[in-house]
Image (cartoon, rainbow, N blue to C red):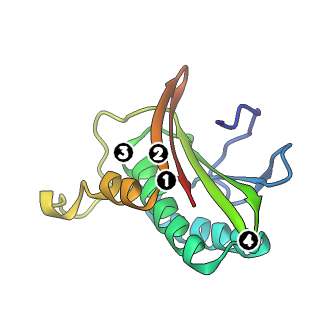
């Protein structure tokens, strides 16, 4: 269930409303320093949905991994879509990050990361998710995970 709705993507941190009532879409800034604001907004959305704190903590870690991957390794624009599925007592959170596809080379300053400092994101996402995957489509890639 990818967000097939037309979404205006920009570098702003404003939330873009979705037609589904339990979906929120956040355009991602293209600098790693802006991602903390997105994590805070995702946290607030899950609080408003009354997602249990242990589920929300796992979902935020997955959000962090997926949005960082999109900003560091993919072409802009990118967006995060959060969906609540079920009722608060027995719910799941679906996380989707859509970008314009892989970047050949991107470097955000500083020294290159050592191999032991990166590459763990997909393992973390798989460990915390009931289901996860990647969908390649015309114009980009969507990485998704469902947390229950």
Per the model, the C-alpha gap separating discs 4 and 1 is 17 Å
Label 3: which secondary element:
helix
Q: Which residue is mark 2?
A: 132
The quadrant of the picture occupied by the C terminus is bottom right
Q: Which residue is mark 1?
A: 130
The label nearer to you, 4 versus 3, is 4
What residue do we see at 69% from left, 62% from top?
91
Label 2: which secondary element:
strand
* Furthest-bottom residue in this view: 53
Per the model, the C-alpha gap separating discs 2 and 4 is 22 Å
What residue do we see at 43% from left, 62% from top?
128
The label nearer to you, 3 versus 2, is 2
Q: Is residue 131 left or right of residue 55?
A: left
Q: Which residue is mark 3?
A: 73
Per the model, the C-alpha gap separating discs 4 and 3 is 36 Å
Q: Earlier in the sequence, mark 3 or mark 2?
A: 3
The label nearer to you, 1 versus 2, is 1
Q: Earlier in the sequence, mark 4 or mark 3?
A: 3
What residue do we see at 45% from left, 51% from top?
71
Q: Which residue is mark 4?
A: 89
Per the model, the C-alpha gap separating discs 1 and 2 is 7 Å
Residue 76 - label: none
């Amino acid at each position: 269930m990818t967000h097939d709705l037309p979404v205006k993507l920009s570098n702003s941190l404003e939330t873009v409303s979705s037609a589904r009532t339990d979906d929120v879409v956040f355009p991602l800034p293209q600098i790693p320093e802006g991602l903390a604001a997105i994590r805070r907004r995702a946290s607030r959305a899950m609080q408003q949905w009354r997602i249990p704190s242990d589920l929300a903590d796992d979902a935020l870690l997955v959000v962090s991994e997926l949005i960082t991957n999109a900003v560091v390794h993919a072409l802009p624009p990118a967006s995060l879509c959060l969906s609540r599925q079920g009722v608060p007592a027995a719910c799941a959170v679906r996380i989707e990050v859509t970008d314009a596809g892989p970047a050949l080379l991107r470097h955000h300053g500083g020294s290159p990361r050592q191999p032991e400092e990166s590459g763990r994101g997909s393992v973390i996402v798989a460990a915390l998710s009931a289901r996860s995957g990647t969908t390649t489509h015309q114009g980009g890639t969507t990485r998704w995970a469902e947390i229950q």
